[in-house]
Amino acid sequence: MGTDARVRYTKMIIRKSIIQMLEDKPFHKLSLTDVCKKAEINRTTFYKYYKDIYDWKEQLEQECLQRTTDILNRCNECNLVDLLTQQFQDMRENAELYMLISSPNFESRVLEISLSMTLDKADTETKKYLSLAKDTDYRRRWDCYYTIYGCLGVIECWLKDGMQEAPHDLAVYYACCIHTCLAGTQNRAGNPAR
């Protein structure tokens, strides 16, 4: 086994060990001692690659965000459905990574940030609807956050359910929710709450 293969193996075994440990407890309760014991490595080996377990987590989060950046850089003139389809296809191809970062025990907002980056590059019509998050009418702001975070919940459900539906189908559903829900919100501006 070459040096690169050993490095990849060691990092993979650290990742798998942490994933297994996260099934039982949240990230902030993991200890380096327990991670090393589970991975069957010593602390010196761990420290060759990471400063601590938070550095490991940050590197993983950066990997995810870099994947999103790469997708966005390849898609200059894409509409929202095309952008989301590419994002969801990447999630399907890298299921272990995205399952990990969407786990409540991982204690990260990186999936939310990744999708926010995607929405920031969305078409003009979508941006118009998303701008409702900054609206002075609290009901429109609430509707916007409800829609965006509800869609995030659908993505997490899709990941947990094994990504059975095609990424394009999920992208169409997500975009439709944003456009339909927020278009209705925009149209009822100024109407009193019932």
Image (cartoon, grey):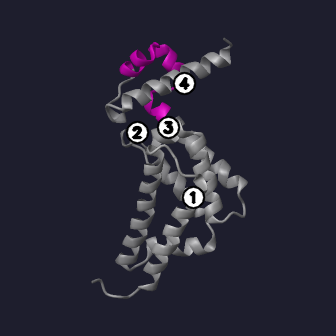
Residue at the spot of label 4: 12
Which one is earlier in the sequence, the residue at label 4 or at label 1? 4
Please identify, in this view, whether the residue under mark 3 or under mark 1 is nearer the observer.
Answer: 1
Q: Where are the magenta residues, as a range? A: 33-57
| Picture coordinates of residue 52, whole percent (x, y) | 45, 27
**Residue 100 higher or lower than 5, as above or below:** below
Specify the label residue 83 is tagged with.
none
- From this viewpoint, is residue 51 visible? no
**Residue 30 placement, left or right of 164:** left
- Type of the residue with mark 2: Phe
Q: Compared with residue 194, is residue 158 higher up or lower down, i.e. above or below? A: above
Marks 2 and 4, the one that precedes in the sequence: 4
As helix, strand or loop, the secondary structure at mark 2 comes to helix
**Residue 58 numbered mark, or none:** 3
Q: Main secondary structure of the magenta part?
A: helix
Q: Secondary structure at mark 3?
A: helix
Q: Is residue 111 visible?
A: yes
User: Residue flagged by tag 4: what amino acid is it?
Assistant: Met
Counting residues from the N terminus, which is met first, the one under dot 3 or under dot 1?
A: 3
Horizontal side of 121 relative to 74 (left or right) equals left
Camera-nearest label, 4 or 1? 1
**Which residue reaches farthest left?**
194
